[in-house]
Image: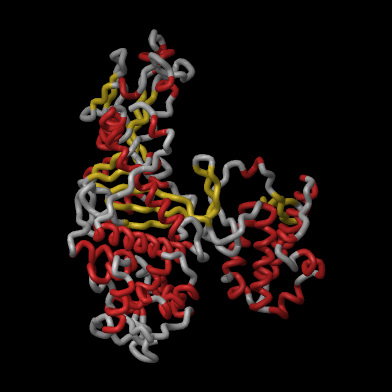
Amino acid sequence: MSLKPQPDSLVPADTLRVAKAAFAKGNPYLTLHDELGPIFEDADFTELFSEVGQSAIPPWRLALVTIMQFRENLSDRQAAEAVRSRIDWKYLLRLELTDTGFNYSVLSEFRGRLLAGNVEHLLLDKLLERCRELGLVKAGGQQRTDSTRVLGAIRSLNRLEVVGETLRAALNDLAVLAPEWLQRIAPEAWYQRYGRRIEDYHLPSKPSERTAYAQQVGEDGDYLLNCLADSAIAAEGQALPTVQALVTLWQYHYIRIDDEGGSSLRWKSNQEMTKKTPTIESPYDTEVRYRRRCGTTWVGYIAHLSETCNDDACHLITHVVTTDASGHEAQSIEGIHGALMTKQLRPDEHYVYAAYVDAILLASAQEQGIETIGPPRPNPSWQTRTEGAYTVEQFQIDWDNKQVTCPEGKTSSPWTEHVRASGDPYLFARFSHQDCGDCEARHRCTKAKPPAGRTLHLLPQAAHDALARARAIQETDEGQKRYHRRAGIESTIAQGIKSCGLRRSRYIGLAKTHLQNMAIGAAMNIDRLFNWFQGVPLAKTRVSHFKALAPA
C-alpha cells in the first residue's frame, strides 16, 4: 500500500445538508468536526506506508474510525458497517452519502501499521494538540491520575493447567514448523495426553496424583527441549514464543536435581512458591501478569489514566499508560510526569492515589515544578504504633554534619550512604552501644538485643523533607478537603469501563492493549468536548433519597 497525501477536503454538500437536518439538536461527531476542524492529516502517517503500490485509504480517516469504534465499543465489522450506513460518521469522515466504505480487515491492518511504527500515541496526542491550539487544554493547573485493572484476553489457568497448556502450545507450533521431526520423537502417549486443551481433561484431584501428573508433564517438556536442542531445527524451534515460554516456566515451576545418574526435574511444592515473582501466566499471551490489589486478583495489565480537573475548563484525558499487572503504580509516576512535560501539559498540582506516592518521587517532581498531592503511606515501624515510643520524627537531623541527635540528647556517629536493591539511595545512622546500653528510655526506642544501639534508615534530605511535608498536609482538614479533587478520576475510569470496554483487552500482548487504551482515552475526550461545547454541566455525585435526608 502506498500513501499519497491529499489536500484537506470539505464535507460533501449532500452529506452536510442531510446531517444538519437529521441532527438539528447536535451530535458529538458533527460538533467535533465543526468546532475542532481537521484533527489528523495524512502527513502524520507518511512513514507507515510505502511510496509505491496501490493507493491506501486515507489514514486520517482510519484514525478517526478507530477512535469512534472504541467510543461505541464496536467490533471491526460493526465499525466498517457504521462507515457505510451512518450519516454522522460520514459527516466526520467527509464522505459522500453513497460511499460504500471499506472492508473491515483494513482496520486491523491500520492498527498493525501504528504498532509497527510505534506511533499509537498519535490517536490521543493529535487530538490534544488541536485542543491546545484552541485553548481547551494548557500547561499548569490541576490534573489527577489513577489506575484500573485490564483483564488479559486469555483464560486464567492454575499451575497444573499452565504448564500442561504451555507444553501443548509448543507441540502445536512445532508440528507446523517440523511435522516429520516431531512425529519421530513424540511418544505415542503424547497424542492422548496433549491432544486437547488441558482444561478439557479431568485433571487429578488428589494432591499426590496432581504432583505425579505435574512430574510427568515436566519430564515430557524436558525431553522435548533436549531433543530440540540436538536437532537440525534448533534455531528455528527455540525462537518460537511458545518454546521460549516453555523454557521460562520450567525454570520457574521445577527444580533441577543433579545426582550420580545425571540430572532430573522435580515439581516445586506450593510452599516453595510462596515468594512468587512475576512470571508467564499463559502461553498465548506471555506479557500478562498476575496481580493482587486490595483483595482483587486478576491476570492482565494496568491502565493509568491522567486528566485535567480545573473547575473552569473542559476535563480532558491527557495521558494513558499501560503496564503489565505486576508493575507497581509508583514505578509509573515519573514517566507520566515526563510525558506530560513533553506534551507541554505539565500540571502545577497533580492529585494521585496513595500507591503513586513515593518520597523520592515527591522530591523529584517538586524540582520539576509539580506538586504531587496524595496520602503518603504511614511509617510502618513499631514505634509509630506504640504510645510514647520515639519515632524517627522525634530525632533531630544535622544534615551538614551528617549526624542525628536522639530525644535523650545522644548523638550518632556520622551516617553512611547506601543504595537499596531498587536503586533508591538511603542514609544509615547508628548510635553507639555505650549511649544506648544503659539508657532509661531504651524500651521506648529500640528492640535490638543489648548492647546494640538504635539504628536509623533515613531518606536523602530533599526526599525526607518532601515526605514530612506531605504527611503534615494530609493530617489537616484543609489537606483532606483539597485531596477530594482526586475522587473525580474514578468516574473517568467508570466511563471507560462501561462505555468503551476498558476493563477487558481485545487483543494479545501489551503493545496492542496499550493501543486500545490510547484509543479509549481519545474516545472519552470526544464526549467531554461535545458536552463542553453544548454547555452541559458536570454531573454531581449521585446520592440516594434516604442519604439526602441525613443531617448536615
Q: Residue at x 71, y 61 (%)?
A: 198
- Quarter of the C terminus within the rendering: top left
Q: Nearer the viewer, residue 74 or 405?
A: 74
Picture coordinates of residue 138 (x, y %)?
A: 20, 56
- Residue that protrudes farthest toward the right in the picture: 188
Q: Residue at x 21, y 29 (%)?
A: 400
Q: In this view, does 308 lie above or below 15?
A: above
Left or right: residue 292 versus residue 370 is right
Q: Quadrant of residue 82?
A: bottom left
Q: How is the image coloured?
A: secondary structure
Q: In this view, does 527 lie above or below 268?
A: below
Picture coordinates of residue 412 (x, y %)?
A: 31, 22
Q: Which of 156 and 60 is in front in this view?
A: 60
Q: Which residue is drawn at 43% across and 29% down?
A: 380
Q: Is residue 339 visible?
A: no
Picture coordinates of residue 290 (x, y %)?
A: 55, 50
Picture coordinates of residue 490 (x, y %)?
A: 39, 47
- Residue that protrudes farthest toward the bottom in the picture: 53
